[in-house]
């Protein structure tokens, strides 16, 4: 663990600062606009623009990294984000904010891809779990830290925007000062949408709904808190506790996922999400601590849905298709995250803040129904249970999230997602050397693969 920290500390520090700024900016925009009585539709549009940028950035990031290299790509994106954050303070024109959030989402996806491809390239198979586990910890700590800053703020003035800009400016320093890396440029994974629409149509639909709930949460949960007459400090605590629930949920989920039927587990978690959300939707003005407790349970369940969906999808798809599977799932999740805030924001304005958790109730019910409508005959023959994959929401995961999946052979990742040496740009002298002076020749161990007949590869 000490060696991992020493080797990857610059990347972890960069991730922490980047997500600190992102978490603060997301909550700040929602709180400020809600305080100025901006319509829920416009607030939802700003959140949707951020997720649309994340989806588009999956394509742009591959090309940018291949063209200029990892360090230059990251530094340029950090500069654009910093300028975009400052732009929020120069004008209150909402359509401009929507464009700026789209740009920030696109550039942040490029940053995620730089960090995750860099970590994957330098991760030895024996340390891969620890390396990406610490990456997830840095991610969630950054998101929660942004809410703590909101709690300490005395108002929603431009000073908070300056703190966000400061975080994004500082996050490029550890990367810019790093002189040793052998991370390879990436090329996009094939999508194979037609195949997956036929193989796992219901799971793709469930993933879309998961994205709708998550996007609505990040964009409109602060608006819900204000509708419940919470102070700025209480709203920051509410957001921090509910985001922290996402990290807490992964540990018991990984244990349960490797020991029980994952489709039954998805059904149970979605029912828990539905029940907790319905309780918040129906109880009029619960006490602050009761609200925190129920919201914590609801968020634990919500942030558990996507990792379970990914694990189930990997059970139903052959190993050679899992790279493109990850890209398709993230695309479905991102599209849902664009739609969710738009729908919820439009109906929150006339109907009130409780609509957010009514929307979560509906999403949970749909996911539960989809997971219940499964084949009654065994769909796969399991030689050994596939490991659970701990993954965050799309705010912190690029299309390179496949590297977190221990069921994917390392050779498959390199074959599909790494450019050929002769296609790589020359002259990027910052990409010479390595983060770790010792090179590992040990391939990632290939786990036993689940086998399925062609007629039994349908989810549901």
Image: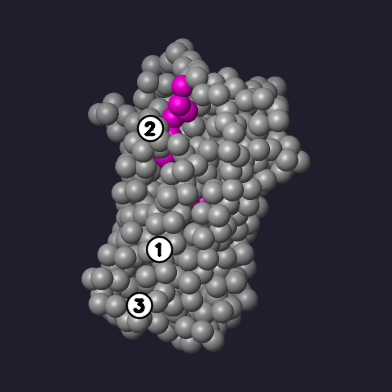
Sequence-wise, which precedes: disc 1 or disc 3?
1
Determine the main secondary structure of the stretch shown in magenta: loop
| Secondary element at tag 2 | loop
Check residue 385 for magenta coloring: yes
Residue 22 appears in the picture as rendered: yes
Compared across the picture, whether 170 is left or right of 115 comes to: left
Residue that appears at 50% across and 37% down: 311
Q: Where's residue 240, x and y in %?
A: 32, 62
| Secondary element at tag 1 | helix
Give the position of the C terminus as an image quadrant: top right
Q: Where's residue 278, x and y in %?
A: 42, 69
Sequence-wise, which precedes: disc 1 or disc 2?
2
Residue that appears at 32% across and 55% down: 244
Please identify the residue farthest to the front as the structure is shown.
376
Q: Which residues are magenta?
A: 384-394
Residues under labels 3 and 2: Cα distance?
A: 35 Å
Label for residue 275?
1
Label for residue 283?
3
Q: Does 92 sit above or below residue 132?
A: below
Q: Residues within 10 Å of mark 2 (few under 14, many from 20)?
A: few
Which residue, given by chain and number where applicable, does mark 2 sit on?
259
Compared across the picture, whether 235 is left or right of 344 comes to: left
């Amino acid at each position: 663990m000490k060696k991992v920290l020493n080797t990857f500390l610059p990347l972890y520090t960069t991730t922490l600062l980047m997500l600190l700024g992102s978490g603060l900016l997301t909550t700040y925009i929602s709180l400020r606009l809600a305080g100025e009585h901006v319509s829920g539709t416009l607030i939802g549009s700003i959140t949707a623009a951020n997720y649309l940028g994340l989806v588009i950035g999956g394509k742009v990031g591959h090309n940018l990294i291949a063209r200029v290299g990892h360090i230059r790509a990251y530094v340029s994106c950090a500069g654009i984000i910093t300028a975009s954050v400052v732009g929020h303070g120069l004008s209150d024109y909402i359509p401009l904010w929507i464009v700026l959030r789209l740009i920030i989402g696109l550039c942040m996806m490029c940053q995620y891809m730089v960090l995750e491809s860099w970590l994957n390239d330098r991760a030895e198979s024996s340390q891969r779990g620890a390396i990406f586990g610490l990456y997830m910890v840095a991610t969630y700590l950054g998101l929660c830290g942004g809410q703590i800053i909101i709690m300490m703020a005395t108002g929603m003035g431009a000073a908070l925007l300056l703190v966000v800009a400061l975080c994004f400016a500082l996050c490029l320093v550890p990367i810019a000062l790093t002189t040793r890396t052998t991370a390879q440029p990436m090329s996009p994974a094939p999508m194979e949408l037609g195949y997956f629409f036929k193989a796992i149509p219901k799971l793709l639909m469930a993933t879309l709904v998961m994205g709708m709930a998550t996007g609505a949460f990040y964009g409109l949960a602060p608006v819900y808190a204000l509708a419940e007459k919470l102070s700025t400090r209480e709203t920051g605590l509410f957001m921090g506790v509910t985001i922290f629930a996402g990290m807490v949920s992964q540990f018991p989920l990984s244990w349960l996922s490797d020991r029980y039927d994952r489709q039954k587990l998805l059904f149970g978690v979605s029912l828990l999400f539905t029940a907790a959300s319905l309780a918040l939707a129906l109880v009029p003005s619960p006490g602050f601590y009761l609200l925190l407790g129920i919201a914590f349970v609801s968020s634990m369940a919500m942030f558990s849905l996507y990792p379970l969906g990914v694990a189930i999808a990997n059970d139903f798809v052959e190993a050679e298709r899992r790279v493109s599977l990850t890209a398709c799932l993230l695309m479905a999740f991102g599209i849902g995250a664009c739609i969710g805030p738009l729908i919820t924001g439009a109906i929150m304005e006339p109907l009130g803040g409780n609509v957010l958790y009514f929307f979560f109730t509906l999403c949970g019910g749909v996911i539960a129904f989809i997971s219940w409508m499964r084949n009654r005959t065994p769909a796969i023959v399991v030689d050994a249970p596939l490991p659970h994959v701990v993954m965050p929401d799309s705010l912190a995961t690029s299309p390179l999230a496949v590297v977190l999946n221990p069921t994917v052979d390392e050779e498959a990742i390199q074959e599909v997602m790494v450019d050929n040496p002769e296609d790589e740009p020359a002259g990027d002298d910052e990409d010479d050397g390595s983060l770790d002076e010792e090179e590992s020749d040990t391939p990632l161990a290939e786990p036993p693969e689940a086998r399925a007949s062609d007629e039994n590869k349908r989810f549901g």
